[in-house]
Amino acid sequence: MAKLEIQNITLDYGQHPVIKDLSFQLQHSELLGLVGPNGCGKTSIIKSLSRVLSPTSGRILLDGKELTGISRNELARLIGVVPQNPYLPETFTVFEVVILGRNPHLGLLSGESSNDMAIVWQAMERAGITHLAKRRIGELSGGEKQRVTIARVLAQEPQVILLDEPTANLDICHQLDIMDLIKSLCMEKNIAGLIAIHDLNIAAQYCTRIIMLKNGQTHAEGTPREVVTAENIREVFRTNSTVHTHPENNLPVVLLNTSYKRLTVESGDWDKHANTEQ
Amino acid sequence: MKIFRLFVVATVIGLLGLTGCSKASSQQNPSSATYTDDIGRIVQIQGVPQRIISLSPSNTEMVYALGLQDKLVGVTSYDNYPPDVKNKTVVSDYSTTDIEKIVNAKPDLVLADNIHKNDAVPALEKLGITVYTITADNIDMFFNDLKVLGQITGKTKEADNLVSNLKSRIQAVADKTAKLTDPQRPRVLFVTWHDPIWTAGSETMIQYLINQAGGSNIASDLKGYVTITLETAIQRNPQVIIVMSSMGTQYTSLDFIKSNDQFKSTDALKNGQIYEIDADIFGRTTPRIVDGLETLAKLLHPELFK
Amino acid sequence: MNDQNSGRGLLTIPVNKHSESAAHKIAQDLPIYSSRRFLRVISISGLTVACIIITVLALTVGSVEIPFKTVWQILISHLPFVNLHVGWSSTADMIITGIRLPRILMAGAVGIALGTAGATYQGLFRNPLADPYLIGVAQGAALGAVVGFVLPWTFGGSYLIPILAFLGAVAAVSIVYLIARVGKTLPMTTLILAGVAIGSLLMSITAYLTMISANKVHSILSWLMGNFSNSSWDQLKLISPYIAIGLGVIFLYARPLNVMQLDEEQAQQLGINVERTKIILLAAATLITAVAVCFVGTIGFVGIIVPHIVRLIWGPDHRLLLPLSAIAGAILLILADTASRTLMAPSEIPVGVITAFVGAPFFLFLLRRKKKAVF
């Protein structure tokens, strides 16, 4: 049975619908990528899966149970969300932020046990931030803060992880680090991962399956090879591109075709060469 | 963990109950009498008070006027009349009452003022102290206050004498001014403060005094103690301006009016009929009010009063 | 039902010993966790003991001289089952137990309320400038009180002003809440803006009423600046249950308040019912503030600065921040009130002036020492 089943959901943002009649499934141990143009509803889908946004129609099932029938606390134990640009309090230490992830496992009156502490430590180890444990959030870089949020989600011990553009503000090295981490979590620990991502190359390299959205509906669904094609890219993103195959793993690689004409750069010759084709 | 927090809260609450509370005990004394004071409180007074505390300068003056100064065990820091008051123990400020000092002086009667209505009066009563509030809005209430105070303190004869004495002095002035017609009554502007100009309208003691002294208050269409705009004051062209002395300030209301260009156009300033009077006499409701009346009458009608 | 063990996520039991001890070591440096409970308990009970000592010391000073030993004897004689030979005057007893003690405890209770409410508001709004008066409590209470001063008739005796002040405070906040609410949600920035707007409106009405009642100006000013000079056991008994209940509710939500320091979405995704938490905490904090303010007037500075001082020393975890703000607030206000009634006896310095004088330099000193961000 699919871990998460989305059946015919319609999502509104304000007054106009963003997602119309969308259905898909999310399984264990897979990393499902959601790609599409800006504003296509990737974030809205993630919000609906964590019950921040309610679909105006359709159902979402988790382990066969309706999402609306699960208590908030229970849901937090099952689903962890790494949002885009999450706010982190400046004066909290990293340790104190990560331990917030244990909240769904604690009763109203109880504090954290040493077991909880150990889990937090292991989460920080996995995210590679144990050396930052006593540092305050305000002192961290963007990449480090991203890892803190991931560690916080790991401390929740979820079975499903939703990530919204986790690599948006990171440099190449950190992007790959994070994606390696996410992928390995899904593979090793049976987690169902859903990632909204705009970078098609990264999606192709890491996701086991990809859904490409257009106008609030599924335009293409399948393996990276099936979905990341020049034709799909032209239809959905209205851009020309060339899709090659990565020499090492046979996965698609998107190369950009710019329409900007190259110039021979000689000062003063701007106008003369502006339309020269090369 | 939560237990310790509960412990803190419990300690706090426990401290409250632990030391208990002292209740004011009321005794029924056969020789007690009941009065209703000027703010409507029912006050029960046992016997004749021997230790009196006054919480306002006007009350202090009344106490002295009835010859009760020997029983006065506490006054405020603002009290200044009669001069003998300097020898009395100060137990309070005028606005903030020092409950501790008052209690320590063991009074059996505290004379309060209207401003103590909401704080000091209930606080003292809760501690079992007898409080009588005096606040007279007009001359009749003031005479009544004197009489009641006389009753309370066993000085009915002195009170009656004082009241009839004051009444006859007022009558002496009124006899000469009652027949004055409107044109004969100088227009009076009474200034209590200058920034903005505060004056006294109808239903105030000041207006009563002005009328009795043979003047006509230019602010009589206003009610109570109110502000009046500079234009209105000047447009009504007062013939006499009476200014209350400002306590402790360098630049007084008198200075302001004298140096103000617009006021120079009024009859009052043209004829030099601008006078400063003692705020202690006119601002307090005490027997000296009648002194003030006589002074005012001389200023307004020097031809009638020598 | 799952046929395979879908795994409890990534960190299945058993957790290894290494992690436990490593985490333990890190936790030592954080006041809330160090030695798990020991230091936390020391902080709270230590501060409580300090508060009690200050209370007793405050009892010994006042405008009337009463020797230390006598004070002690009077106190002890009121304990149950104690029989002490009475060697002091009943006046001294009345001063200690009838005047000073209720006044000091009142200052403590108000300090507790304002300190806790301030910390709660700062946590809810995630704004270091938040204080208990942010959304209209002070302005509503002031207007209620002034209306009571100006009314020509009275009812309820000496409780008229406090009742009207309380009703004014609650009404003001309710109006602000109703304006700011959007459907089922309560956006915090809208709340602040509505609070500022309504607060200004109420203030102008208050100013107008004050101006037209010339003979009451004195009493009104006195109330607005706040003072404890007329505190009594009755008042204390009246406000204590409300403060205790409000405090209990707020402390229950200490950990959820921690989680809410992330943004609202993340808190929701971590299992917190954000809207319900907001409303409950707002209501509780407003209640204790309104109750504290209605008898003694609007005393400033305590609610905004005390939580910052506590945060600078003990960190931002609300499980420590809230109770310590309560006790620190009590200490500050008791000290301030003692100064206000002794420095210029028999006159009194308004207690709000003293709190600023005492608190501001101390806060600046801490700020300079720590040299790091406060919020």
Image (cartoon, rainbow, N blue to C red):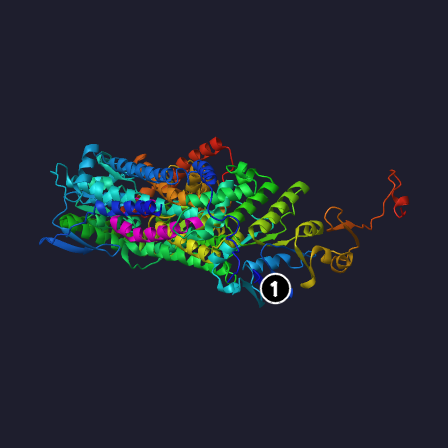
Q: Is residue A174 found inside the magenta-colored segment of the image?
A: no
Percent position (x, y) of residue A98?
A: 51, 45
C232 inside magenta stretch: yes
Against A91, residue C219 (above or below) is: below
Residue in the picture at 64% in, 66% down: A20
Vertical comparison of C373 with B42: above or below: above
Q: Main secondary structure of the magenta part?
A: helix
Regarding residue C48, the answer to whether it shows in the image is: yes
Q: Is residue B204 above or below residue B67?
A: below
Q: Nearer the viewer, residue A87 or A66?
A: A66
Range of the magenta residues?
A: C227-255
Quadrant of residue B34 within the rendered picture: bottom left
Q: Find numbered disc 1 in the image and state the secondary structure of the residue it sits on.
A: strand
Q: What x and y, as percent, mark residue A240?
A: 80, 55
Asked whether A100 or B66 is in front, the reply is: A100
Q: Left or right: A123 with respect to C84?
A: right
For disc 1, the marked residue is A12
Chain letter behind tag 1: A
Is residue B72 among what the camera can see? no
